[in-house]
Amino acid sequence: MKIYLDYVFIINFLFDFILLLGIAIVLKRNTSNLKLFLGSTIGGLSGFIILLNITSILFFILKLFLGLLIVVVAFSYKNIKYTMNNFIYLIILSILMGGTLYLFNIEVSKTVLGKSITNNKLYIILLLITGFITIIIYSKHILKAKKITNSKYKTTLFINNKAMNLIGYLDTGNNLMYKNRPVLILNKDIKIDTNNKKTFYIPFSTLNSKGLMKCMKLNRIKVEKETFKNVYLALSSDKFQLKDADIILNINIWEGKNEKNNSKTNRKNKTA
């Protein structure tokens, strides 16, 4: 039987890219297109293990290892829990996509508009489109279900001309303000470059403790697709107990932006 290695690579590459894209959407992972491309490339190359003369058990173990490698490359390694969540969703989406493609394979006729599609490019394209649509629909369904309770936001921190992709957690209990500007709180585990940044200490209080936190002013920070300017960042001296949270957001950044937008609108109306 002939095996076309270029087809094996391309199909596995595209399948894994769709899966990684689904993980990024569902779990709101901050990652780059380059990392998704590299992870998908490893997935494409992993298809060649079918050429190895190994037992089924060893084949299964190798596939699991490669799956872990793919998610680490695509989404980086933060901790075991973070990586295992990515890996579990890779398996779930793989099963979902694989089941859909299998159903498509047995239900769809071998001819479409009178043309044979078995084992040719048209057939592969239809499978890929079906898989892509499945992942997108599933991802949107999960996001819709989580929308009310979801408090995670893709957050990009800009410090000393460097961008850091973080997971922001919206805590309605964080109303900390400094000079009438909202204060965001960074997890102790996140290391940042504070060179050339003026730092100072601000007081804070919670139900269980109070004290001082090291703080600095940020020129800008991006939360999802919105950019906020002139906010303050406090450096926590303790690790967060919140799942996957890198930075605690402040609800006042949205309120401040709305007030600013309303002021601009009022000024325009007065001018008119």
Image (cartoon, rainbow, N blue to C red):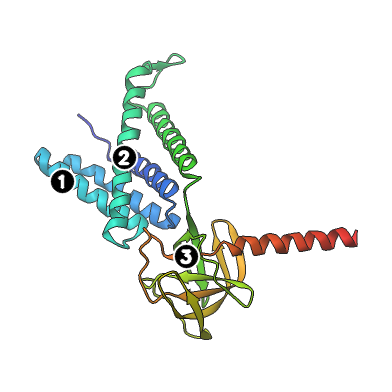
Separation of disc 2 and disc 3 at Cα?
Answer: 29 Å
Q: Which residue is mark 3?
A: 248
Label 3: few (<14), some (14–19) or many (≥20) C-alpha neighbours in 10 Å: many
Amino acid type, label 3: Ile
Instruction: Please give the label number shown on residue 61.
Output: 1
**Residue 229 drawn above or below residue 99:** below
Q: CA distance from mark 2 to mark 1?
A: 17 Å
Looking at the rendering, which quadrant does residue 82 occupy?
A: bottom left
Residue marked by disc 2: 92
Q: Tag 1: residue type? A: Ile
The quarter of the rendered structure image containing the N terminus is: top left
The span from disc 3 to disc 1 (Cα, nearest Å) is: 38 Å
Of badges 2 and 1, nearer the viewer stands 2
Which mark lies nearer to you, 2 or 3?
3
Q: How far across and down, in percent of the image, does residue 173 sit? A: 50, 63
In this picture, residue 6 sits left or right of residue 50: right
Point out the image quarter for the C terminus. bottom right
Name the residue located 49 percent from the left edge and 76 percent from the top edge.
Answer: 204
Considering only order in the chain, which callout, 1 or 2, is on the residue closer to the N terminus? 1
